[in-house]
Image (cartoon, helix red, strand yellow):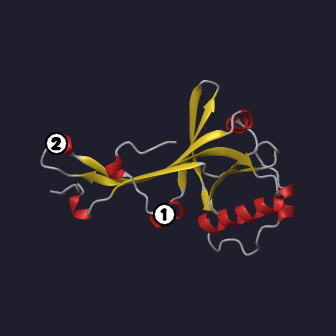
Amino acid sequence: MNQVSYTKRNCTDQEKIETFLLGERTGVLGMVDGVLPYTLPVNYLWYKGSIYFHGMGSGKKEKILSQNPPVCFTVYKEHGTVIDPVPCHADTSYMSVMLFGQAEKVRDFKEAAEVFQKFLDKFMPKYYSQPLTSTLIEKYRSGMDGNQVSIYRIKPEEMTAKENAVEPKELFTMKMP
C-alpha cells in the first residue's frame, strides 16, 4: 500500500478529497510502457467513485493500456508559494490526490453514453440541447482515424491525498512598483 511519507501533509478528509476531485479538470495518467514510465495529462471525470477519461480509440495510450492496465492517476493544484523569513523554508501550498488501479475500457454503450454526458455537463454545461444516447456512442467514430472513441474507468484500489493549506496572506505576491 502506498503511504504519504510526510504524514503532516496527509489529507484524510473524504469530503474534501471528493470536492477536490469533482472540481478539478485535468489529471496526469501514469502508465508503464515496457520498462519506461509514460505520463499524459488528460481531462477526467470523477463519477461514482471512479476516474473516467477518454481518447480516440487508437494511439500510444490505447496500445499501452491494452497491454499493461495498471496505472497511477494524479490530480493536483498549486495555490502558490508560501513565504518564510528563512529562504530555505519557503514552500508550496497545494492539494494533490493519487489513485492507483487498473484502467478498464468501458464496453457498455449505455454506461459510455452516461459518462460522456457527464463529461459534457462538466466541461460544456448547457451547451448541447439533446442528451447523448448509447446508439450515438456506439456509432460515433473519431474523425482522426475512424476508430470508435474509448472511455476508460479507473476504480481506485488505493488512494492517497496530500495538502499544504495556508492562509492567503502567507502566500508570496509580487508587489508592483
Q: Secondary structure at mark 1?
A: helix
Which kind of residue does numbered mark 1 sit on? Gln
Q: Secondary structure at mark 2?
A: helix
| Location of residue 144 (image quadrant) | top right
Q: Which mark is residue 14?
A: 1
Work out whether residue 130 or residue 169 is closer to the camera in this orientation and state it.
169
Q: Is residue 71 above or below residue 120?
A: above
Q: Position of residue 29 (x, y in %)?
A: 58, 43
How far apart, in angstroms, are the residues tagged by discs 2 and 1? 34 Å
| Location of residue 109 (image quadrant) | bottom right
Mark before the other along the chain sequence, 2 or 1: 1
Query: Quadrant where the C terminus lies?
Result: bottom left
Q: Is residue 62 above or below residue 173?
A: above
Task: Tell me what residue is drawn at x 69 percent, y 34 percent.
Answer: 68
Q: Is residue 36 above or below residue 89?
A: above
Task: Tell me what residue is drawn at x 23 percent, y 54 percent.
Answer: 172
Q: Which label lies toward us, 2 or 1?
A: 1
Residue wearing tag 2: 87
Q: Position of residue 65 (x, y in %)?
A: 70, 38
Work out whether residue 174 or residue 80 is closer to the camera in this orientation and state it.
80
State left or right for residue 85 relative to residue 29. Answer: left
**How many neighbours does mark 2 have within 10 angstroms: few (below 14), some (14-19), or many (20 or more)?**
few
State left or right for residue 124 relative to residue 59. Answer: left
Q: Residue furthest top?
A: 35
Q: Is residue 139 above or below residue 122?
A: above
Task: Tell me what residue is drawn at x 82 percent, y 67 percent.
Answer: 133
Q: Position of residue 101 (x, y in %)?
A: 62, 45
Task: Tell me what residue is drawn at x 17 percent, y 50 percent.
Answer: 84
Which kind of residue does numbered mark 2 sit on? Pro
Residue 77 seen anywhere in this rendered image of the structure = no
